[in-house]
């Protein structure tokens, strides 16, 4: 059994996360601790024109926590890796920018999310998008294969965040960008929250203290260029909302650049 601080069983946590996001893929209308869908995406800042150009089925299962595509500034022909691609909203928006000569690879560990994303990308004729089964700590990609790594609402779910940032750095060419939205906390969360697998799977329990989060990104060889708070994101269940208010759990978007020649 693997544990975090001898308290939270990471095998159980992975199962909880998979069960939750299987439901997000298959029954997006259900009520979760967090919001999902198009209204959320619009409130976070996704332009309607972009959302109109990608599969509605992907957006109904959108469970991101912030907007960062403006920071990612993906250009035509670029290669993009989406860590924890879910049902595919950000991968498809990235594909609009990268165009037919670009490439987007989404990686996710939940079969139902992958199946949905693959089906929708196929139906919409996004030939430059591919979804691979894998973990964000060890994504099945080559070294220095990508110009930009993106991720939305996922890294907080990982019990090994330094491994995720190291994997992102490895996947990027020197000078490549990391653009993401995620959940962080103002102070260190108490064990009652970090050891609650259901709050963890709801994107709260795994929130890392913000200075530690920044330090982990920098330790992987990135320089953080932009860091912004996403006031438009909020959790909806009372329990989740209490935890967020009490411990200053918030959504942020950031842009960081991998060191090395551009
Ligand atoms: C909150 S959802 C966000 C999905 C998508 N980025 C979006 O914005 O809709 C989290 C996703 O990350 C995936 N995930 C969580 N931890 C993961 C890990 N360690 N490796 C791979 N995928 C993971 C889940 O399966 C789920 O699809």
Image (cartoon, rainbow, N blue to C red):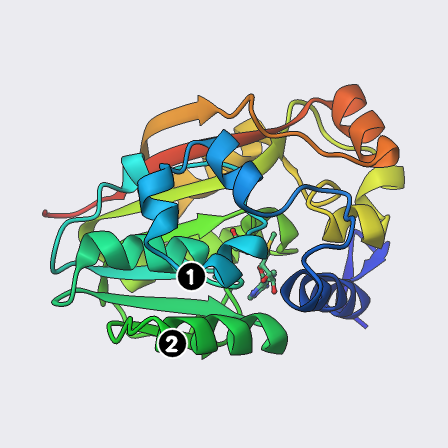
Residue 161 placed where, x, y %?
Answer: 55, 51
Instruction: Indicate left or right for 254 with 240 as reference.
Output: left
Q: CA distance from mark 2 to mark 1?
A: 9 Å
Residue at (60% x, 78% y) in the render = 111
Residue at (10% x, 47% y) in the render = 262
- From the viewer's side, name the closer residue of 37 and 214: 37
Ligand 1, seen in the image, is in the quarter at bottom right
Numbered label attached to residue 255: none
Residue at (77% x, 54% y) in the render = 30
Query: Would you place residue 234 above or below residue 4 in this image?
Result: above
- From the viewer's side, name the closer residue of 30 and 75: 30
Q: Which image quarter: residue 225?
A: top left
Query: Would you place residue 145 above or below residue 7 in this image?
Result: below
Instruction: Indicate left or right for 176 with 133 as reference.
Output: left
Residue 32 placed where, x, y %?
Answer: 77, 48
Query: Would you place residue 29 above or below residue 223 in this image?
Result: below
Would you call the spot at circle 1 few (<14 residues within 10 Å), some (14-19), or many (20 or more)?
Answer: some
Precedes in sequence: disc 2 or disc 1: 1
Q: Secondary structure at mark 2?
A: helix
Observer able to see residue 159: yes
Q: Which image quarter: residue 255?
A: top left
Residue at the spot of label 2: 123
Q: Which image quarter: residue 234?
A: top right
Residue at the spot of label 1: 55
Instruction: Indicate left or right for 157 with 46 as reference.
Output: right
Quadrant (top left/top right/bottom left/bottom right) for the N terminus: bottom right
Residue 249 placed where, x, y %?
Answer: 68, 28
Would you call the spot at circle 2 few (<14 residues within 10 Å), some (14-19), or many (20 or more)?
Answer: few
Q: Are marks 2 and 1 in contact (CB under 8 Å)?
A: yes
Observer able to see residue 110: no
């Amino acid at each position: 059994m693997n544990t975090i601080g001898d308290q939270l069983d990471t095998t159980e946590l992975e199962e909880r996360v998979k069960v939750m996001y299987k439901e997000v893929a298959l029954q997006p209308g259900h009520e979760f601790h967090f919001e999902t869908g198009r209204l959320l995406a619009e409130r976070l800042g996704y332009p309607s024109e972009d959302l109109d150009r990608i599969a509605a089925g992907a957006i109904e299962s959108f469970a991101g926590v912030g907007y960062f595509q403006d920071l990612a500034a993906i250009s035509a022909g670029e290669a993009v890796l989406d860590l924890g691609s879910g049902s595919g909203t950000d991968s498809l928006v990235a594909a609009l920018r990268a165009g037919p000569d670009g490439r987007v690879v989404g990686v996710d560990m939940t079969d139902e999310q992958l199946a949905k994303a693959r089906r929708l990308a196929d139906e919409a004729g996004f030939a430059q998008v591919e979804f691979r089964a894998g973990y964000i700590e060890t994504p099945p990609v080559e070294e220095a294969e990508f110009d930009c790594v993106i991720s939305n609402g996922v890294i907080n779910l990982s019990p090994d965040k330094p491994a995720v940032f190291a994997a992102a750095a490895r996947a990027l060419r020197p000078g490549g960008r990391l653009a993401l939205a995620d959940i962080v906390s103002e102070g260190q969360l108490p064990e009652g929250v970090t050891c609650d697998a259901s709050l963890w799977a709801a994107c709260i329990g795994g929130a890392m203290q913000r200075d530690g989060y920044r330090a982990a990104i920098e330790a992987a060889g990135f320089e953080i260029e932009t860091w912004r708070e996403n006031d438009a994101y909020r959790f909806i269940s009372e329990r989740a909302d209490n935890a967020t208010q009490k411990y200053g759990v918030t959504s942020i978007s950031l842009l960081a650049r991998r060191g090395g020649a551009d």
